[in-house]
């Protein structure tokens, strides 16, 4: 018999069901709880009737209109079991949950619509957006930017600048995943938990000397980090070096051009004020592209890095322009920036593919000796291997070269930071070679690294790498340690002093691993009591990424060699340096790279010669033709002979070019596949590996003497002597 089941449950009347969701009145609660069986565990009151027993409750009148209600007599007391009560309670809870879920869905939709409107209709992941917002709300107020203290001990100042999110990132529904809260920079990564559904936030936190958010202007950056350096350089006669480092498209050039402009204005003002020092301002501007320096103030003239007997690196032929006022200096800077090598890449439409180095000298008037120096280095953008997977080989080689030199820069800093390493591999790249005095300086020196980061979520892993790279620089001690670059290097003392380290930094410096360990990072986060709304960063994975990325970098290009210096050879005189100089590029070539370079140069030279020869033959040909057409050359047999000679010569020239091209192409292929140890290919190798020139029925020599000379590394081939000009009626003796 169903008397115990309430009719409203069976009839399913909404009004009555809805009423169940209301909080129960104390009376109902008491009665229901008393009736609940102990098996449900909710009631403390024991049920004397035992499990399954029904408790009779006076209903106070008829209930419901269902069949059950009809069968029951109005005067019969309603009987409700504990199970029924439990079902009611569950129903009520479910209903409540449904309403809450509905409420959450509606507010989520509203938020997504709002965010979508801000992002031009592209809705990013709203859950991650909320998590990041939540994280930011819990962040403490950023610390006020204190300008760099010029009196602070020499060392490396590491700052971070986050640029605003760009339209193309918004269009790709990318979230701003970087929280810049001076002195902390946090990169959030979105992850799914192991269940594959639950979203969580992974936050990588770093601490630097200054962290500039997207609201900060270049003036803010300049005033804080660069401006105090100018009076210091004048007063101490020091050397200051500013680097802009970061992923391609992260705002390095934007920041550096602003700093160049502001420095120009400030420098002349201070020089004017310090007229007693009697200084003049001059500027050099060059870029390192593909491992070679080019003068940006001299129409991209190719330069040579030379090393003197004292192991001082000199850049032969680099133009240094004297500037009398800020306008002149700005003109030089604008000229240099306009000549810089740029290319469109997948990340940046106008990506700088070179390291631009602008050196501002303060020299004593008349004497010419350097009083102080400010070097502004706009590093080429670091790239992930994935970013540099361009179909154009040149882009890939550029990317590999850039990464290689940045890796070399890091290695130098790493080696200097490690007291156990006596050798600093400055020669590992041109960049580190020419910047050596930024790190090893006899006088007072300050180095400022501005790490630029993109806020887009697609760049999160790259931003973490940039911050990790910069984090590494903080460990550079510059603390009275002798670092030598090669056994013959004159031992140079690093300028003494180390920045006072925060406990966090000390903690990091004690270790040898590239980044804080999981525990350390946890300790850092804990020490700062910064809430992390996401999961604990999985550093083991980060380490793998870091190693992986380095492997990728190395894999993109051959490992560089760091050989001991060769004895100085005779070379061109360098202004301001000893006459006996050895080209640094010859002393320490990267073998495979040098091999490619050799062939590249040779092919270009060869092509030029072929073109010149062709032009000469063309002139001869047209003269010959006009003679025949005008009837001046009546001997057709002679005419045929001359044409034959011309064509043979042309074929010979182009066959030689084709053969060299075949070798070059095989070399490129070999470089790309990294299969063989670098070695110079012979023509036989090339024939075996590369495409064959078209078989010729003409009896022409396979290799010209000029070409053979070039292949054997002999001096540049001699131009063929010009044949005397033919006049109408004259017979040419030889077309060669
Ligand atoms: N702080 C900023 N505020 C506004 N726009 C910025 C900022 N930083 C960078 N940008 C813009 O971002 C784009 C990329 O910047 P920039 O060319 O300076 O990057 P980069 O790091 O030098 O790249 P690459 O290494 O490829 O040359 C430019 O359009 C620039 O105007």
Image: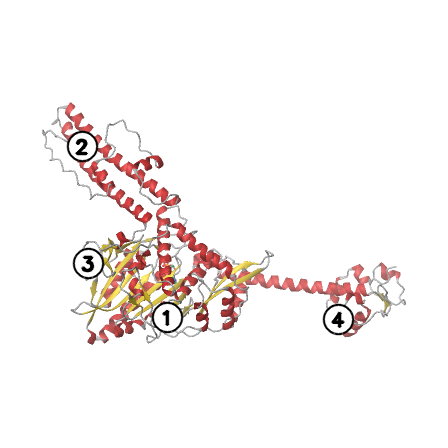
Q: Quadrant of residue 280?
A: bottom left
Tell me the SS state at disc 4: loop
Q: Nearer the viewer, residue 153 or 528?
A: 153
- From the image, tell me which residue sits under label 1: 220
Mark 2 vs 3, N-terminal side:
3
Mark closer to the chain start, 1 or 4? 4
Q: Quadrant of residue 606?
A: top left
Quarter of the picture holding the C terminus: top left
Mark 3 highlights which residue?
Answer: 574
Residue at which label 2 appears? 621
Q: CA distance from mark 2 to mark 3?
A: 47 Å
- Tag in front: 1 or 4: 1
Drawn side of residue 19 relative to residue 105, left or right: right
Residue drawn 30% across the image and 46% down it: 595
The local crowd at label 2, few if under 14, some if 14 to 19, many if 20 or more residues have their Cα within 10 Å, is some
Give the distance between the C-alpha atoms of the residues marked 3 and 4, in whole angstroms: 95 Å
| Disc 4 target residue | 24
């Amino acid at each position: 018999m169903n008397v115990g089941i309430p009719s409203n449950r069976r009839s399913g009347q909404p009004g009555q069901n809805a009423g169940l969701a209301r909080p129960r009145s104390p009376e109902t609660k008491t009665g229901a709880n008393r009736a609940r069986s102990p098996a449900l565990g909710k009631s403390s009151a024991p049920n004397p009737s035992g499990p399954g027993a029904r408790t009779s409750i006076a209903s106070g009148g008829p209930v419901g209109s269902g069949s059950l209600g009809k069968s029951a007599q109005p005067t019969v007391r309603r009987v409700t079991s504990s199970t029924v009560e439990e079902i009611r309670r569950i129903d009520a809870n479910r209903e409540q949950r449904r309403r809450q879920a509905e409420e959450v869905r509606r507010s989520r939709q509203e938020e997504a619509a709002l965010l979508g409107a801000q992002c031009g209709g592209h809705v990013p992941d709203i859950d991650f957006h909320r998590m990041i917002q939540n994280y930011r709300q819990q962040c403490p107020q950023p610390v006020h930017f204190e300008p760099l203290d010029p009196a602070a001990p020499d060392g490396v100042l590491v700052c971070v600048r986050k640029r605003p999110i760009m339209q193309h990132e918004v269009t790709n529904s990318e979230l701003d995943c970087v929280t810049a809260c001076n002195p902390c920079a946090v990169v959030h990564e979105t992850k799914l938990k192991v269940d594959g559904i639950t979203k969580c936030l992974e936050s990588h936190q770093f601490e630097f000397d200054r962290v500039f958010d997207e609201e900060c202007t270049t003036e803010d950056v300049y005033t804080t980090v660069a401006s105090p350096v100018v009076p210091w350089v004048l007063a101490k006669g020091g050397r200051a070096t500013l680097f802009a480092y970061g992923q391609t498209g992260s705002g390095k050039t934007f920041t550096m051009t602003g700093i160049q402009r502001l420095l120009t204005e400030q420098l002349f003002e201070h020089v004017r004020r310090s007229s007693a020092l009697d200084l003049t301002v001059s500027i050099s501007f060059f870029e390192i592209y593909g491992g070679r320096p080019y003068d940006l103030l001299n129409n991209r003239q190719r330069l040579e890095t030379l090393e003197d007997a004292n192991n001082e690196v000199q850049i032969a032929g680099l133009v240094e322009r004297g500037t009398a006022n800020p306008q002149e200096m700005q003109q030089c800077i604008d000229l240099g920036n306009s000549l810089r090598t740029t290319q469109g890449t997948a990340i940046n439409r106008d990506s700088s593919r070179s390291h631009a180095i602008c050196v501002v000298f303060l020299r004593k008037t008349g004497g010419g000796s350097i009083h102080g120096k400010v070097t502004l280095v706009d590093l080429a953008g670091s790239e992930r291997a994935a970013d540099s997977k361009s179909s154009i080989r040149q882009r890939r080689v550029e990317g590999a070269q850039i990464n290689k030199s940045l890796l070399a820069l890091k290695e130098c800093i790493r080696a200097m930071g490690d007291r156990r390493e006596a050798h600093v591999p400055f020669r590992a790249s041109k960049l580190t070679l020419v910047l050596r005095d930024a790190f090893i300086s006899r006088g007072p020196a300050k180095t400022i690294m501005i790490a630029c980061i993109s806020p887009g979520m697609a760049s999160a892993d790259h931003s973490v790498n940039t911050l990790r790279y910069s984090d590494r620089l903080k460990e550079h001690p510059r603390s009275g340690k002798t670092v030598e670059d090669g056994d013959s290097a004159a031992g140079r003392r690093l300028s003494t002093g180390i920045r006072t380290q925060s406990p966090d930094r000390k903690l990091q410096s004690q270790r040898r691993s590239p980044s804080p360990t999981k525990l350390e990072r946890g300790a850092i986060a804990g020490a700062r009591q910064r809430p992390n709304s996401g999961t604990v960063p999985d550093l083991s994975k980060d380490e793998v990424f870091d190693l992986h990325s380095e492997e990728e970098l190395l894999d993109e290009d051959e490992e560089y060699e760091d050989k001991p210096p060769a004895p100085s050879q005779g070379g061109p005189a360098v202004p301001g340096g000893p006459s006996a100089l050895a080209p640094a590029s010859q002393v320490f070539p990267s073998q495979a790279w040098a091999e490619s370079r050799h062939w590249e140069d040779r092919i270009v030279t060869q092509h030029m010669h072929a073109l010149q020869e062709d032009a000469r033959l063309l002139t001869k040909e047209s003269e010959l033709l006009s003679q025949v057409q005008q009837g001046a050359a009546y001997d057709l047999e002679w005419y045929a002979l001359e044409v034959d000679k011309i064509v043979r010569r042309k074929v010979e020239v182009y066959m030689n070019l084709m053969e060299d091209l075949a070798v070059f192409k095989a070399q490129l292929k070999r470089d790309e596949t990294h299969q063989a140890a670098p070695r110079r290919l012979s023509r036989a190798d090339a024939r075996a590996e590369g495409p064959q020139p078209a078989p010729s029925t003409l009896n022409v020599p396979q290799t010209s003497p000029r070409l053979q000379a070039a292949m054997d590394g002999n001096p540049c081939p001699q131009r063929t002597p010009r044949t005397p000009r033919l006049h109408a009626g004259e017979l040419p003796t030889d077309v060669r």
